[in-house]
Amino acid sequence: MRLIQFDSAAGERRVGTVAGQTLQVVNQVASTRELALLAIGNGCSLAEQVATLGTKPGPVYLDLLAAGRVLPPLDHPDPAHCWVTGTGLTHLGSASTRDAMHQANAPRTDEATLTDTARMFKWGVEGGKPAAGQVGVQPEWFFKGDGDSVVRPGADLPMPEFAEDGGEEPELAGLYVIGNDGQPYRLGYALGNEFSDHVMEKRNYLYLAHSKLRACSYGPELRVGPLPADLNGHSRLYRGAEVVWEKAFASGEANMCHSFDNLEFHHFKYDLFLRPGDVHVHFFGTATLSFADGIQPQPGDRFEVAMGEFGAPLVNGLAVTTPRFGLGKVRAL
């Protein structure tokens, strides 16, 4: 089952299941979060809850996408209660681009001479998929923002004027709701563009935290249920009608050095992330970047992230924005 959230013609929020070109609108709920909390309270799956509530025919899906009325597939009415986070160096091959940014000039022949990137990737390969019941090595982790950093499918990703780059990161994201029992519940997965500033990060690895404080997008669809182990899609950059860069990308546990269980454990092990009612969007990393091929996106370009198992592609533009805050604007009380 694949779910979307959208604005109706009257401007009301709705949840729909994707069935070909026509949506089935889920009765009695206005958000995916509301649907999930009902399912948690009733002790059933999302699919069972949808079947219980029933559906009715809805609008044409492509028309909604064209009109910009498709919302992120999971959010929170209070953006401060939507955590957006991620993990890096999780995919086989993901260390190569990062390591090239930060490697030392010395030959890297042993653990002592590895860069931090190469060392952490090595740890993941060795211990990121532990045996059942065991805790694996913890991954790189970063904070991206809250619900205000999320851009709906089809909308522009804002690149602040102070940014040195605005580059795509095609990824999968896990979408979660914390139940009233403090238990994280995974609703499913979505395509994501974990948009970052790679030029800033390349200057120094300690700028990684700054480089991640950017907008992002995920969706348009939430895929409910388990994932195939081997997933393959493509990432494209359009400049007008021309494709100026295109590359295949792979995900799923067969292409990762960490298991999803291990990544989830090392996120939700913190009590901070177990607040009932909160929403979590967690990006799982990538090994494919246009930046690695010397591409620098420009305002007006469009990013496309696509994978057949997730339905419609995730498309976003790029626009430069002026930050609301300026130098010397802090006021003393």
Image: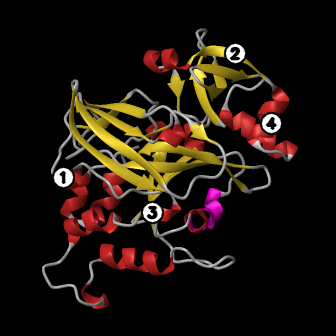
Q: Indicate the quadrant where residue 163 lies.
A: top left
Q: Amino acid at mark 1?
A: Asp
Q: Amino acid at mark 3?
A: Asn
Q: Which residues are magenta?
A: 265-273
Number of residues whose C-alpha sits closer than 10 Å to that of mark 1, classed few (under 14), some (14–19) or many (20 or more): few
- Are the two marked residues, 2 and 4, in contact with CB atoms closer than 8 angstroms? no
Secondary structure found at label 3 = helix
- In the image, taking residue 278 as reference, residue 105 lies left or right, namely left
Q: Earlier in the sequence, mark 2 or mark 4?
A: 4
Q: Earlier in the sequence, mark 1 or mark 4?
A: 4
Quickly name the residue at label 4.
49
Quickly name the residue at label 2.
57
For image coordinates 25% across by 58% down, the residue present is 201
Q: Nearer the viewer, mark 2 or mark 4?
A: 2
Q: In the figure, 93 relative to 131: above or below?
A: above
CA gap between label 2 and label 1 equals 45 Å
> How would you classify the magenta stretch by its main secondary structure?
helix
